[in-house]
Image (cartoon, coloured by chain):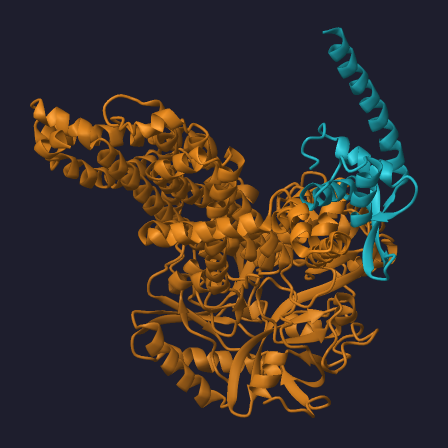
Chain colours: A orange, B cyan
Amino acid sequence: MRLIRRILYFFRQPRQDAELAEEMDFHRRMLERESGDRYTANRRMGASTLAREDARGVWLPLRFESVLQDLRVGVRMLRRSPGFSILAILCLTLGIGANAAVFSWIEGILFRPYPLVAHQERLLAITGTARGEAGHTDISWPDLLDLQKSCTLVDSFIVNKIMGTTLSLGDRAERTIGSVVSANYFDAIGVRPILGRGFGPGEDAGSNAHPVTVISYQLWQRRFKGDPAIVGKTQRLNGIEHTIVGVAPEGFLGTFVGWAMQFWVPASMEETFEGGAYKLEDRGARWIEAYVRLKPGVTLEQAQQEMSAVATRLETDFPATNRGRGVKLWPLWQTPFNNAGTLLPTLGIMLAVVVFVLLIACANVGNLLLVRSFARRHEMTVRVAVGANRSRLLQQLITEGLILSILAATGGLLVAHWCRHALVLLFPARAGVAMTLPGEIDWRVLALSAGVCLISTLLLGLVPAIQTSKIDLAGALKSEMAGVVGGGHGKSWLRSGLVVLQVSLSFLLLVGAGLLMQSLQRIRNLNPGFATQGVLFTAIDLRGAGYNPQRAKTFDDALLQRVQALPGVESAAFGRSTPLSYGSFSSSPIAVDGYQLPPDEQPTVQYNQVGPAYFSTMGIPLLSGREFTRADNETALPAAIVNDVMAAQYWRGDDPIGKRLQVKGQWRQVVGVAKVSKYQSVRENPKPFFYLPFRQDFSVGANLNIRTRMPAETIAAELAREVHALDANLAPYEVISLQEQMDRSTSPQRVAVTLLAVLGGLALLLATIGLYAVMSYTVSQSSRELGLRMALGAGASNLLRLVLAHGLTLTAAGLVLGATAALLSTRLLGNLLFKVSPRDPLAFGSALVVMTVAATAACFLPAWRATRTDPARILRD
Amino acid sequence: MGTDLLPGTLDMLILRSLTRGARHGSGIAQHLKKISEDVLDVGESSLYPALQRLLLSGWVTAEWGASENNRRARYYKLTAAGRKQLGVENREFDRMILAIQKVMSCA
């Protein structure tokens, strides 16, 4: 009750003050009237200003004025020693800024990744699962409709599958990406187009039945120049005229973490964009990536239970397609099919790392404050002597800490603001894809940063407070100068402890950075099973240009001939997919002559459709048999090439060449065995895989692989000319090397390495500064002791050794502590480590060397200064 | 004056002076002075902090009203909690006075 009254009073303080003044004035006049003269009245009243202060003091024991006074004193103290202030604020700015930046990334990428989308807290990702297989699968359209019908706990199912297309406007063709979505998409996510409409019910049914599209604000502005009459106009997308029915609001980027969508089409247009067959009625065709929005109050577990029950029912109803298939819900931040999944481990580790950096920064500033609190011991003593109580002193110190951390928090938020889009920069650019990984600085991030600021304030204020609580008047007046270098003194334990903490945390980060760097090195040196040097690839979007298979075959043949004739080109070959790309390979159930299926096993194996000379062009070695030739066409005997893992698994050591393999119900003859290579990820384990002749399983639109020693730009220019000569409406996509492709697929590792290296370097710098500051202070405080030692015959080298030994003892303690922590915690890097033991001696060794060198450097200067002590002067003083 | 009072008695005296109805600050001081036959002359410096203490504890409430000479004055009124508190303080005071008297008469 009293507290509430106090708070109420605080908010009405100006009025309360006025009322009190008025009341007392009234009292005075009454007295005046009674006694007849002002003098007597005043005398009887007493000092009224003091009385008013006292009366107010009843309400607010911690007075605003005193806070103001503390602020003034604090600011004056900071301005008096600008070097200290700038260093302290800089350290804290880096610490708080790193935290705020990582908070904002986590908020903007993992928790609220989709600008303008309503109720993201109830949004979950949904994928399929296959029994006996790790990870996730896509979902088929009929399964999704059944789930939608049966799940009572879900508000809406939102389908979103990203697609690419070539957008040609006038004579400019450019690659762009969009999504195939369910008809409820815009309604379900609560995004209203600013022009026109979203999709209507039923527009996601039928084969190519509804060629309509909603375009992004960006596309509308950039390519259609903000045409206000855009709705109703048509645009050719993948060869079909689409009516533009709406324009999405500015800032809406779709629902795929990392990439900004430029257009949306309803699921009925799936065939046009996804390729292959009409899949909306095919329960076996799994191609959908989707989200669900739960009803309010429903938990993930409840929804998962309901979904699993439906999935089990579907298994019994449709055993042919659904045996062993389930569904799985994922929190948005674990979404496996977009960049949330790839960035999650990195951001998780970053969170831990920035907390360490903040701790180091706080320890650093704490140390600086501590050192200064020694220097201010006299001031504090005087204040205590003239009657300041300890809580008042503490208030002053905490206020000073608060000034520092508020300035630093402001700076830190600026840093975070500048770093908002920094993550994207760490990813390799790819043509036609607008990457967007924005940090989001909303109230949650602000609140967290404020919390960080508050905690650091307390930490900062506490350090000198512990010191001042030991102020003893008599002792301080004697102004003792303890020798700090030789022998341990009680008062230096705190400072030493903070240095040890900094060294150990920096060491931990350096070990982490070293481990990740080695992983990246291993990945880069890994042999993917195909040549990375001297092979380029590109694609021409024939499907987007409306080619039918016959026209496409003619075009492919003609282009291949022209490319092979280019100077510097050794060979060229088509392949439907290129290893390590976002698009997946085809897969098919298989049967093998003489291979008895274990019950309940329906082997499905991935494959690629490749043209003549594919293996020699890609540099994939053939272990036996032959590669596909031009003779392996539509009329020839169906052929296949398997990899050695598949040969070992299904032919059990027999030579598979000449044996039969059934793919999609058709028997084929195995004509060759290729060496296993990496298909979808450099980190995957060797797995069965096979190849079919492109002509025998043709699809419009394929990648062209070119073996050449020429640089990519040269080939790109020549290729563009050749393509243009064949069809003026076509343009090839970007031409990149397979090495570049490898680099793109390992970008999460590279992001992690870069971030950890930057933060590790920062931590090292902070720790070095901290060590240097403490050593300098120690030397300056021990000048008398050092002078005495010198006078008694100690040489410069003795002193150098003495001071260095002190600093390096602290460092060694920090290293031991850090190494212990690292041994216990580096396995948390988990998935980001690749073929590197979490206790890799090289990473630990190099961190040790770096830390020791930095520490020695930090100690050397103060130590050298110690040798310059003038014993005569010291003894005189 | 007032500083010579036993600690805490001023609060009790104020509460007591409000039992017959609301008074303003000046009225309270006058009342105390009159009843005590000019012995208790309470000045601003002890009266107003004491009144704030009572407000803070919720034993009195304050309201603006017109004074006897038609000026704006702040009137203090005893609350139920204040009345109870007065009882407590009264008993405590009696006990204390009794104790003091015993000590003084024994010597």
Along the horizontal axis of the image, is A211 left or right of A356? right
Quick check: A810 left or right of A176? left
Asked whether A634 or A228 is in front, the reply is: A228
Which residue lies most toward the right here? B20
Q: Is residue A184 left or right of residue A110?
A: right
Q: Residue at x 29, y 41 (%)?
A: A773
| Res. A141 visible in picture | yes
**Position in image of residue A709 (x %, y %):** 29, 69
Up the image or down, A205 lies above or below A785; here it is below
Quadrant where the C terminus of chain B sits is top right
Q: Give how far across and how far down residue A753 sits, in percent.
A: 41, 50
Residue with the most extreme top position? B106
Quarter of the image for residue A283 reads bottom right
Image quarter (top left, top right, bottom left or bottom right) of the N terminus of chain B: top right
Q: Residue at x 81, y 76 (%)?
A: A200
Residue most extreme to the front: A36
Q: A200 or A46, which lies in front?
A: A46
- In x, y percent, where is residue A15? 72, 59
**Residue A774 location, quadrant:** top left
A615 w.r.t. A267: above or below: above
Which picture quadrant has residue A295?
bottom right
Residue A675 shows in this picture: no
Task: Tell me how many marks there are.
Answer: 0
Q: Residue at position x 52%, y 65% from top?
A: A577
Between A803 and A360, the residue placed more toward the observer is A803
Percent of width and height locating residue B24 = 82, 50
In the image shown, does A616 or A518 lie closer to the viewer?
A518
Q: What residue lies at 65% left-to-right and 87% top-to-bottom?
A: A235
